[in-house]
C-alpha cells in the first residue's frame, strides 16, 4: 500500500526511477491466467506519441501501442488469481457503470488479472503494473493487489467509443513518488461518511494513495475522544457559517478507513494543534491559558487561540486525543498540524511540538506536521508538509540537509481551495489564482531551494473547506486540478508536458459526467 520512499535518480524509458523498495527475485513467479501479451515485446514510444492509448491520467511510465482493440461485449469475462478477486469485482463494477457491460468474475477470463510474487518484477515495484491489451484478450499483471488496482484504473480510463473498446498495446507503469495524497478538511465544513466515500472514489481514479483528513480546527472537532467527550459532542456541533456540523463516531471513522483501504488509500488523520483549536477550547476552556469561556467559532477567520503549553493537563489531552485516533488508524502516520501557532513564542512552540511528536511516537505512528515544525528541532523521521509559497525558506533547506523528508503541497500549485480565476464562486486566493496550467506547472525536485528529490516523499492536493458547502463544491474545486497534482506525483518527470496533459485531461470529462463528478469547465482545456 503506502510505500513512503523518496525517489531519486533516473532510469527507465521516460527517465523515471523504478520505485525503491522492490527486490529482484529472478523470473516472474505465480500467475495462472491465459497470456494475452504479444509474443514479442512491443517498443515504447515517446510520451505523447501513443495514439489512442494517449488518454490516461496520470501519464503512464511507458506506452507501446499495438494494433486494433479489445471490444467489450456480452461475452466479456474477468478472471482473477487468488488475492485479485476484490480488484476483479471492482473492475466488473466499473465496466457495468461505464459501459453497461455485465462481465462475470471467475478464475479465468478474457480480461485476466494476475498477481505475481512480491518482487517478481523489479521495475514494477510495490505499486506498478503491466497492462497488455490485444484484440482477443486483456492481461493485467502486478506484484501486489495495489498494482493490479492501478492497472484497472488505467484500463477503465481506456474504455472508449460505442461499442465500448480498449485500444491495443502495452502499458508498463509505476509511480515516481511513494506518497500521493489528497487532503480533505472536514472541520471547516463537515462531510458525511458517504460524501467522503464518494470523494475517495474520485481520488482512486487518479492513483492517489493517501487521504489526509483535517479532523479538527477552530470551527469543529470531528472525532470522538472517549475521555474528553465534549470535544465531539460540543465542539463538533457547528461549522463555518453556523450550520449543524457533525462528527464521526468511532464506527463512522472505521467505515471511512476501511472504504479507503479497499481503494488502496491510507487514511492519515490530523489533529491540528497547538493553534487552530477553537472548537477544543470552546468544549474545554481549561485547555487555554486564560481558562475563560470561549464561544464556538463559526467565522472563517482563524481564532488565534492556543493550547496552554505550560499546563500538564494540556499534554494529558494531547496524549488522549492522539491515542484515541491512533487506535482506530491502521495506517502508519498521524498528522499533528503545527501551523499558524501565532499566539506562542518560538520556545513555547518548540516545546509543544516536541511533546506532540513524542505522543505520536508512543502510539507507534510516524508524525507528519505542517512545515512550520521545521523551524524548530524536529524528531528524526517526522515528515514536514510544505504548504507555504516562497520555496526559499532557509529553515526548510536546513531541515532537509539534516534528513527531514517533505510532502509537497505548495499553496501556489496544490491548494485546491485557491480560486482558479478571479471571481470564481468558490475558494480563496491568498496564494494567488491557480488555473489548471499552474496546478500542473511545477516539479517536486526543484520547487524548494535546498530540497532535492531524494528529500521529497511525494505530493498532496489539499482542500480546505471554508467556502466549500457540499461534495459538489469540493469536486468543483478538485476537478480538474486534482488530476494535475496526481500526475505530478505519479508520472515520470520526462513525460511532463502541458499540451499533452491538457489533451488527455479533456478526454476525462465524459467519464466524470458518467460518474456524476462535478468539475470546473476551465477554458484552458478543449473539453471533449
Ligand atoms: C492556510 S495550510 C491554513 C488553513 C486554511 C488555509 C486556507 C495551513 C497549514 N493553514 O488553516 O484553511 O490556509 O487556504
Image (tube, rainbow, N blue to C red):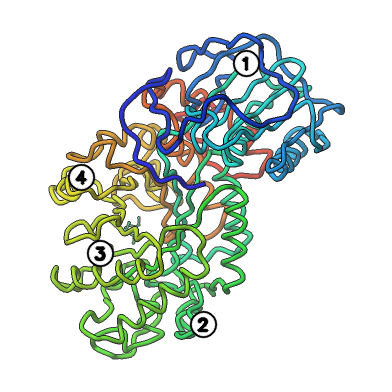
Q: Which mark is residue 220?
A: none
Q: Residues within 10 Å of mark 2 (few under 14, many from 20)?
A: some
Q: Which residue position holds label 2?
A: 233
Mark 4, ligand 1, within 8 Å: the answer is no
The residue lying toward the viewer, choosing from 298 and 213, is 213
Determine contact: label 3, label 1, CB under 8 Å: no
How far is disc 2 from disc 1 in space, using C-alphas? 55 Å
Residue at image position (40%, 42%) is 420
Q: Identify the element where label 4 is drawn.
A: loop
Which of the 4 image quadrants contains residue 444? top left
How far is disc 4 from disc 1 in space, using C-alphas? 43 Å
Residue at image position (28%, 90%) is 291
Q: Identify the element where label 3 is drawn.
A: loop
Q: Residues within 10 Å of mark 4 (few under 14, many from 20)?
A: few
| Disc 2 versus disc 1: nearer the observer | 1
| Disc 4 versus disc 1: nearer the observer | 1
Q: Residues within 10 Å of mark 3 (few under 14, many from 20)?
A: some
Where is residue 374? Give x, y as percent.
21, 56
Quadrant hosting ligand 1: bottom left
Q: Which mark is residue 390?
A: 4
Where is residue 217? Give x, y as percent.
39, 69
Q: Which residue position holds label 1?
A: 169
Determine contact: label 4, label 1, CB under 8 Å: no
Earlier along the polypeptide chain: callout 2 or callout 1?
1
The residue lying toward the viewer, choosing from 1 and 318, is 1
Residue at image position (50%, 43%) is 208
Mark 3, ligand 1, within 8 Å: the answer is yes
Q: Residue furthest front?
A: 26
| Disc 3 versus disc 1: nearer the observer | 1
How far is disc 3 from disc 4 in space, using C-alphas? 16 Å
Amino acid at each position: 500500500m503506502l510505500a513512503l520512499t523518496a525517489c531519486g535518480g533516473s532510469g527507465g524509458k521516460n527517465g523515471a526511477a523504478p520505485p525503491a523498495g522492490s527486490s529482484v527475485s529472478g523470473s516472474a513467479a505465480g500467475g495462472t491466467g491465459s497470456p494475452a501479451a504479444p509474443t514479442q515485446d512491443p517498443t515504447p514510444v515517446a510520451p505523447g506519441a501513443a495514439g489512442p492509448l494517449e488518454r490516461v491520467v496520470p501519464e503512464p511510465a511507458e506506452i507501446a501501442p499495438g494494433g486494433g482493440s479489445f471490444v467489450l461485449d456480452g461475452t466479456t469475462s474477468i478472471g482473477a488469481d487468488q488475492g485479485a478477486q476484490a480488484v476483479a469485482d471492482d473492475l466488473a463494477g466499473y465496466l457495468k457503470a461505464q459501459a453497461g457491460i455485465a462481465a462475470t468474475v471467475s478464475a479465468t477470463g478474457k480480461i485476466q488479472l494476475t498477481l505475481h510474487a512480491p518482487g517478481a518484477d523489479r521495475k514494477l515495484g510495490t505499486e506498478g503494473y503491466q497492462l497488455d491489451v490485444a484484440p482477443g484478450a486483456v492481461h493485467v499483471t502486478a506484484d501486489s493487489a495495489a498494482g493490479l488496482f492501478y492497472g484497472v484504473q488505467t484500463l477503465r480510463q481506456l474504455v472508449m467509443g460505442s461499442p465500448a473498446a480498449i485500444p491495443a498495446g502495452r502499458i508498463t507503469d509505476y509511480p515516481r513518488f511513494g506518497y500521493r495524497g489528497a487532503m480533505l478538511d472536514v472541520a471547516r465544513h463537515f462531510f458525511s461518511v458517504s460524501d467522503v466515500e464518494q470523494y475517495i472514489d474520485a481520488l482512486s481514479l487518479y492513483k492517489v494513495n493517501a487521504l489526509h483528513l483535517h479532523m479538527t480546527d477552530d470551527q469543529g472537532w470531528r472525532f470522538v475522544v472517549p475521555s474528553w467527550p465534549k470535544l465531539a459532542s460540543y465542539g463538533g456541533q457547528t461549522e463555518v457559517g453556523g450550520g449543524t456540523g457533525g462528527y464521526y463516531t468511532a464506527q463512522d471513522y472505521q467505515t471511512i478507513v476501511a472504504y479507503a483501504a479497499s481503494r488502496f488509500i491510507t487514511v492519515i488523520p490530523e489533529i491540528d494543534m497547538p493553534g487552530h483549536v477553537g472548537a477544543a477550547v470552546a468544549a474545554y476552556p481549561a485547555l487555554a491559558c486564560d481558562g475563560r469561556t470561549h464561544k464556538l467559532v463559526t467565522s472563517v477567520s482563524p481564532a488565534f487561540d492556543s493550547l496552554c503549553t505550560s499546563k500538564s493537563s494540556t499534554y494529558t489531552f494531547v496524549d488522549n486525543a492522539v491515542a484515541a485516533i491512533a487506535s482506530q488508524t491502521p495506517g502508519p502516520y498521524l498528522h499533528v498540524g503545527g501551523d499558524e501557532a501565532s499566539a506562542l513564542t518560538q520556545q513555547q512552540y518548540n516545546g509543544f511540538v516536541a511533546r506532540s511528536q513524542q505522543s505520536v511516537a508512543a502510539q507507534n505512528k510516524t508524525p507528519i506536521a505542517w512545515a512550520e515544525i521545521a523551524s524548530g528541532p524536529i524528531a528524526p523521521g517526522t515528515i514536514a508538509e510544505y504548504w507555504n509559497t516562497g520555496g526559499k525558506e532557509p529553515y526548510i533547506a536546513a531541515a532537509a540537509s539534516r534528513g527531514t523528508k517533505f510532502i509537497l503541497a505548495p499553496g501556489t500549485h496544490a491548494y485546491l481551495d485557491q480560486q482558479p480565476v478571479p471571481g470564481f464562486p468558490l475558494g480563496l486566493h491568498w496564494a494567488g489564482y491557480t488555473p489548471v496550467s499552474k496546478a500542473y506547472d511545477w516539479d517536486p525536485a526543484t520547487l524548494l531551494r535546498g530540497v532535492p528529490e531524494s528529500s521529497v516523499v511525494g505530493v498532496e492536493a489539499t482542500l480546505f473547506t471554508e467556502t466549500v458547502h457540499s461534495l459538489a463544491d469540493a469536486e468543483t474545486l478538485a476537478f480538474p486540478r486534482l488530476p494535475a497534482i496526481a500526475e505530478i506525483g505519479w508520472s515520470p518527470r520526462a513525460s511532463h508536458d502541458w499540451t499533452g496533459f491538457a489533451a488527455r485531461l479533456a478526454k476525462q470529462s465524459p467519464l466524470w459526467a458518467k460518474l456524476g463528478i462535478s468539475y470546473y469547465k476551465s477554458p484552458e482545456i478543449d473539453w471533449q
